[in-house]
Amino acid sequence: MKKMSDKQRRIINFIERFLSDKGYPPSIRDIQAACGISSTSVVDYNLNILKSRGHIERDADVSRGIKLRTRTPTSDSLVPVPVIGMIAAGEPIPVPTPDTWDVAAVSETMEVPRELTRGRENIYALKVKGMSMVDALINDGDIVLMQHVSAVENGEMAAVWLKGEKEATLKKVYVESNRIRLQPANEQMKPLYADPDDVEIQGRVIAVVRQVA
Amino acid sequence: MKKMSDKQRRIINFIERFLSDKGYPPSIRDIQAACGISSTSVVDYNLNILKSRGHIERDADVSRGIKLRTRTPTSDSLVPVPVIGMIAAGEPIPVPTPDTWDVAAVSETMEVPRELTRGRENIYALKVKGMSMVDALINDGDIVLMQHVSAVENGEMAAVWLKGEKEATLKKVYVESNRIRLQPANEQMKPLYADPDDVEIQGRVIAVVRQVA
DNA sequence: TTATATAGCGAACACCTGTTCTATAATTAC
DNA sequence: GTAATTATAGAACAGGTGTTCGCTATATAA
């Protein structure tokens, strides 16, 4: 798909906001005024381009007959995620159970944009306690969005439980010949090597959210 | 609330169906045709009743200016935030302008849960480029949610522009007797001291979002 | 240079559409 | 019964609104 011009992007954004604000689409002259366009025909011209590119639909000869094609209705754009526990040094990582999956059965829940989870299944959240994960660039109080998987691709960030050290960490995981390399997200730091029998992959890190103020 | 007449119920149902079908509200004559009403004035008459009873809202003199009131879309639990630029070492931090405030006038936009911004005003987002902010536990590619303020409370995390070093950093700011202490979020690291004339507060850090996978 | 495509401008047209007005029927109140 | 209220009809008006047309400007290609 070809790139949108700056003007076209402004038009799309305005339509979105107008629509969620007023509940009905803007007229061509509404768009003209809001986006500072000099002529209605220019708006029409760009709307036709946006239509041909598939960004909107237009009903001909119908006032305000603009339909957005890109945006899913905002109703399901927020997904609830169960916060099933803490993650901290010296304590095992909470493993999701059928009970904790159920958003309704869990005490705490947070809502995140679908954009973050990208519609993936088996998502849960953990709250980080302590400073033990600064080498993963994760602070005390951060929220880690996880996906429960038993194995990860090489290079993916995962929640790892080190049996011997009784230590929970978040590291990039690389499977090497007969050992596992655990690489901190801060690439200036040195990797850690572990025996495959000593590590337990608990899940994949999807995102980190830190609320500062 | 008084009971709706049969005709009014048909009108409401038709508006709902039309809206979800076409994406924009029907005109009065659309309603007239679909509900088998003989005159536009009768439609107008009943729409006014529905409005006074609180079932719909109408914008006067606006074609298709009908808004359904019954269902509350979760649209206001997600707030759009303009992504106005990058933040990187050696480059000035983009300062929001009246133009970039306007969500409609900005090329890129992201949506975040209202919970994250807590309804604050003047929120914008910056994308972090490079590894220069690892001491603030911020990685390459992270998104920083900012609030534009000219001054911050002691201990708050802020985007700071160091004039002398031509360096943008995110630090906790403490005003001391005749110097400013800039404390990295990673408290194991040493603070930086700067002359008050050398620092420029660009904004307050509200949140950090990192999409890993 | 000469073409060609893209983008913008302003005006005008014709239909769409909300609104208003008058008249009339149906229902309810008294 | 009459009067008042509610509901309906039809028509017309004025402004809203999508569309079109001719023209100009700029950039790209040949």
Image (cartoon, coloured by chain):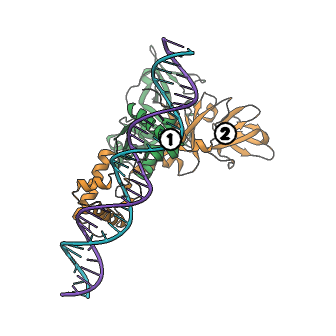
Chain colours: A green, B orange, C cyan, D purple
Please provide percent x and percent y for residue A5: 50, 31
Count the numbered circles shown: 2
Q: Residue at x 38, y 53 (%)?
A: B63
Q: From the viewer's perspective, is A207 left or right of B184?
A: left
Residue A7's tag is none
Please provide percent x and percent y for residue B173: 69, 43
- Going by the numbered disc 1, the residue's amino acid type is Ser
**Residue A107 visible in rendering:** no
Answer yes or no: are tags 1 and 2 on the same subunit: no
Dot 2, how many residues are within 10 Å of its Cα: few (below 14), some (14-19), or many (20+)? many
Q: Residue at x 33, y 53 (%)?
A: B27
Q: Residue at x 57, y 42 (%)?
A: B124
Q: Residue at x 53, y 48 (%)?
A: B117
Residue at mark 1: A39
Residue at mark 2: B171
Along the viewing direction, whichever of A5 and C21 lies nearer the viewer: C21
Chain on which label 1 sits: A
Q: Nearer the viewer, mark 1 or mark 2?
A: 1
Please provide percent x and percent y for residue A9: 49, 36
In the displayed structure, B194 sits above or below B56; it is above
Marks 1 and 2, how far apart at CA: 47 Å
